[in-house]
Image (tube, rainbow, N blue to C red):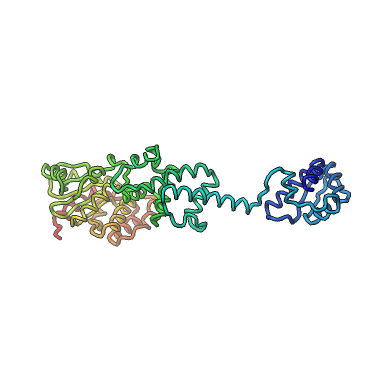
Amino acid sequence: MNKELSTYLKSKHLSRLLKLLKDKYISIGRYSGVVTINNLTKEECIDIGDLLGKTLKIDSTLKISYKELTRKINETRFQGFTWDGLFKCYFNEEILTKKEKRELVISSYESLISELLNKYKLYIPGIKDSNSKIYRLLKSNYNKDNNLLYSDLDNIFNLLSNMPKNSINLSIYASTTGNPHYLDLNTRTSNLYLKLLCYINNEDYPTTNDKRIELLARYNIYVDSLSNYIITYNLCGNEILDIFYNNKQIFNMNLSNVLSMDRIDSKEKRVYIFENPSILNSLANTNYSIIITSGNPNITLYKVLDKLVLSGNKLYYNGDFDPEGLLIADNLKKRYKELELICYNKDDYINSISSETINKSRLNKLNKIESEELSIIKDLLVLNKKAGYQEKNIDNIKEFMYLRVD
């Protein structure tokens, strides 16, 4: 019955009508509702008119319901037809509703995830929960390119199932995938790896490269361990540092050095940390233990400070009097309760003030400052809109260091 009806309909100018009926079914998931045909052709007026038993005008608009069509067709020799069977014969394909397509995609996605989880013996709670962020992320990627997602997760699940127990370079760790650049920062695959790593360990996704590097370091994965360095002076605690200490030499310590050292210490249990290398020129050949960050702290600095704190050292920090410099000081203070912010008084600012004007967008960064020790400089920067640099305040810094007694 359905096949004969399909053959009959194909012989008429009814393709637009059938296409609209199919789309309506796909949209609402049932054979009901009304379809609208605009600008009827002469041929359509004749053939649809014959089917409905009415006269239609060329270029007019026709609204017709499934209910009426079903009744009219059942009044013909094709009585007893079904829309499901008719559509299969007419369009020669399985017609799936939007809901059925969604369910099929979800089923296929979950099968992909299950296959890879089983392959690497991983358990990631919530990865199949449609309310979780990671589900929505992976499902979106699946919808864009399911083959690419399979390939990505095949590599990333492999990496996650082989987290390093000891320190390893990022490119060596990534080489497990066959590509040493697979986890290069800011690539698609690196971002997906980090998002999964953060999800599994219930951590916030790092929004800057410095924070991404620090996150990886917490899992023994290190980025660029040779060129990531700090300048140190008069540190001790192991064979390498003791040589530099005894010879009063500056040591450019990179991350690879730090990772090889079980202990880092200072003779006086005090370490002074400064932002600018030029400060060291004024303090060389002294007994002070000094670290120069050369701007924003990197993972090498954090690793060294962690070891110094573990050895019982008191930390002191001073940097530039500008929004960026105060943010560095504020972040270090939040991270290390053993750290004291020094020389951040009005007199220090007056000594260091420059002619450089700070624009509004930079001043807005001061809203993030929380440390009480920085409040005086923060207020002075807002008032004067002039930056200050620690090199001009070296005498006050020296005096603090000379008089300091804990």
- Look at the image and tell me in which quarter the C terminus lies: bottom left
Name the residue furthest bottom.
372
Direction from residue 164 to residue 32 in the image, left or right: right
Direction from residue 6 to residue 105 in the image, left or right: left
Q: Where is residue 222 in the image (x, y as percent from the top left)?
A: 31, 45
Q: Position of residue 224 (x, y in %)?
A: 31, 41
- Name the one closer to the observer, 171 or 206: 171
**Residue 270, quarter of the rendered image:** bottom left
Q: Where is residue 17 in the image (x, y as percent from the top left)?
A: 77, 47
Direction from residue 96 to residue 193 in the image, left or right: left
Q: Can residue 355 be seen in this view?
A: no
- Name the one closer to the observer, 78 or 127: 78
Name the residue furthest front.
1
Give the number of marks.
0
Q: Can residue 116 be seen in this view?
A: yes
Identify the residue at image location x=86%, y=44%. 46
- Name the one closer to the observer, 9 or 329: 9
Direction from residue 183 to residue 351 in the image, left or right: left
Name the residue furthest left.
246
- Name the one closer to the observer, 192 or 241: 192
Identify the residue at image location x=49%, y=44%. 150
Q: Where is residue 91 in the image (x, y as percent from the top left)?
A: 72, 43
